[in-house]
Image (spheres, helix red, strand yellow):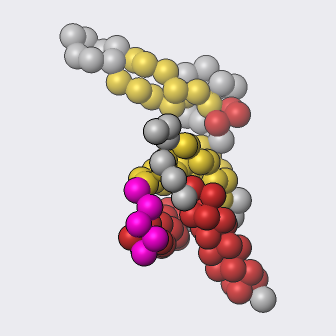
């Protein structure tokens, strides 16, 4: 059976990394509870980013005899630090079955959570 990868863009920007981490933990628990309740075998990766990927790139830098390390460098400034933006989330869900219902559940949870905060 084939695996399905679902990518959900969490469009809300956070003020700091602590708020983004709290939201990532909330999403993780929502995914875990829904998967256990409906017996859906799945896993999720939730990433917190604060770098604008349009102006940055990941490069491998070799120093000495050790394995090359990954560094994020700016595309605009030569070997400079990339431009930072507000922290935001990237959610990737990997499922065999039940992925449509799970993704719709997560989207409605995110929307309802942030609609209440704005009012």
Q: Is 74 located above or below residue 84 in the figure?
A: above
Q: Residue at x 43, y 54 (%)?
A: 42
Where is residue 35 drawn, in percent x and y?
A: 44, 66
In the orientation shown, which residue stands out farthest toward the front?
1
Residue placed most toward the observer, 118 or 37: 37
Quadrant location of the C terminus in the rendered image: bottom right
Is 117 left, or right, of 80 in this rendering?
right
Q: Is 91 located above or below residue 105 in the figure?
A: above
> In the rendered structure, which segment of residues is drawn in magenta?
37-41
Q: Residue at x 43, y 19 (%)?
A: 60
Whether residue 96 appears in this view of the structure is yes
Q: Does the magenta stretch include residue 40?
A: yes
Q: Is residue 117 magenta?
A: no
Is 113 left, or right, of 72 in this rendering?
right
Q: Is 50 located above or below residue 76 in the figure?
A: below
Is 51 left, or right, of 66 in this rendering?
right
Where is residue 32 drawn, in percent x and y?
A: 41, 68
Residue placed most toward the observer, 71 or 111: 111
Q: Which residue is drawn at 68% across and 73% down?
A: 108
Where is residue 33 drawn, in percent x and y?
A: 42, 74
Residue placed most toward the observer, 2 or 117: 2
Magenta residues, dominant SS class: loop
Where is residue 64 drawn, in percent x and y?
A: 25, 11
Q: Which residue is drawn at 41% across and 66% down?
A: 39
In the orientation shown, which residue stands out farthest toward the right?
119
Residue 25 sits in quarter:
bottom left
């Amino acid at each position: 059976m084939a695996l399905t990868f679902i990518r959900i863009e969490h469009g809300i920007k956070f003020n700091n990394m602590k708020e983004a981490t709290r939201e990532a933990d909330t999403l993780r628990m929502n995914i875990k509870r829904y998967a256990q309740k409906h017996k859906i075998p799945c896993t999720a990766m939730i990433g917190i980013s604060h770098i604008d990927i349009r102006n940055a790139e990941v490069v491998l830098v070799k120093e000495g005899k050790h394995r090359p390390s990954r560094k994020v460098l700016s595309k605009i400034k030569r070997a400079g630090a990339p431009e930072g933006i507000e922290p935001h989330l990237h959610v990737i869900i990997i499922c065999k079955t039940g992925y449509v219902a799970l993704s719709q559940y997560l989207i409605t949870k995110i929307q309802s959570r942030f609609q209440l905060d704005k009012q």
